[in-house]
């Protein structure tokens, strides 16, 4: 095995171990247990990731990346905005019925708890999520809607709203609180958001503020 292959194997082992321990223990997760599960030493964490927080952020990115790739596959390339949003919503609802749904919810709650106890980690996780969401912004920007084309700023506003909608609805589905929230319900709710002129119909507010893109 080459040095690069060994490094990647150790990195993968630490990410998998971190997911198992952090999903269970949250901010109480001990670095020593993570490295023990991975068959490595704490020095490997600092060598590969720099810190425990960096390991947590890398774990989240590693966990989320396949989901963003599947979302891109679920949205037709030539679709207009509402058709794209429809495909996104239906994929998100289907993910609520997979074996990963409960572990995903558990991880979301755990990460929120960890963020409340560590402001530095909170900032790092927020930056990580924003980086991942750029894939969604790019997915919606440039699509036709109401006779025009969706700008990156409009897509950013939409992604923020859709994330809030889907996280809330999916938590309700997994916990048995969102009765009747089937695939069509997700799609209808998402289309309603995307159709709202107050959300998507302008690039900036009256003060000329454009926000970050």
Image (cartoon, grey):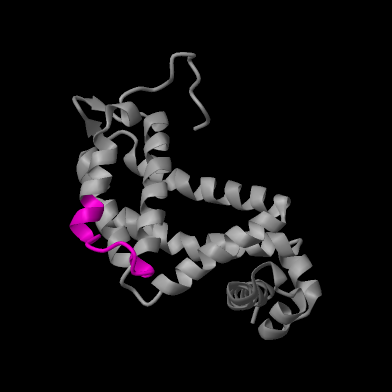
Question: Residue 149's x, y, as percent?
Answer: 27, 28
Residue nearer the viewer, 117 or 91: 117
The residue drawn where x is 36% and y is 29% is 151
Give residue 40's quadrant in the image.
bottom right
Magenta stretch encompasses residue 26: no
Magenta stretch encompasses residue 175: yes
Question: Residue 52's x, y, as percent?
Answer: 73, 65
Question: Residue 159's x, y, as percent?
Answer: 39, 42
Question: Residue 119's x, y, as percent?
Answer: 71, 50
Q: Is residue 77 visible?
A: no
The residue drawn where x is 67% and y is 84% is 37
Residue 7 versus residue 192 in the image, above or below: below
Give residue 171's quadrant in the image.
bottom left
State left or right for residue 156 relative to residue 121: left
The residue drawn where x is 34% and y is 31% is 199
Magenta part of the chain: 173-187
The residue drawn where x is 72% and y is 81% is 33
Q: Is residue 98 visible?
A: yes
């Amino acid at each position: 095995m080459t040095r690069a292959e060994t490094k990647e194997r150790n990195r993968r082992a630490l990410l998998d171990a971190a997911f198992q321990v952090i999903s269970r223990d949250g901010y109480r997760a001990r670095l020593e247990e993570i490295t023990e599960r991975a068959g490595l030493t704490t020095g490997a964490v600092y060598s590969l990731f720099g810190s425990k927080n960096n390991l947590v952020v890398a774990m989240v990115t590693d966990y989320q990346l396949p989901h963003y790739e599947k979302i891109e596959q679920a949205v037709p390339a030539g679709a207009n905005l509402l058709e794209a949003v429809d495909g996104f919503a239906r994929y998100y609802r289907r993910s609520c019925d997979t074996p990963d749904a409960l572990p995903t919810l558990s991880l979301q709650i755990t990460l929120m708890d960890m963020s409340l106890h560590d402001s530095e980690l909170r900032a790092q996780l927020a930056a990580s999520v924003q980086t991942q969401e750029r894939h969604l912004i790019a997915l919606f920007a440039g699509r036709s809607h109401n006779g025009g084309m969706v700008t990156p700023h409009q897509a950013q506003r939409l992604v923020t709203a859709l994330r809030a909608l889907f996280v809330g609805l999916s938590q309700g589905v997994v916990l048995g609180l969102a009765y009747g929230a089937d695939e069509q319900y997700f799609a209808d709710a998402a289309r309603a958001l995307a159709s709202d002129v107050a959300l998507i119909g302008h690039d900036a507010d009256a003060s000329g503020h454009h926000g970050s893109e």
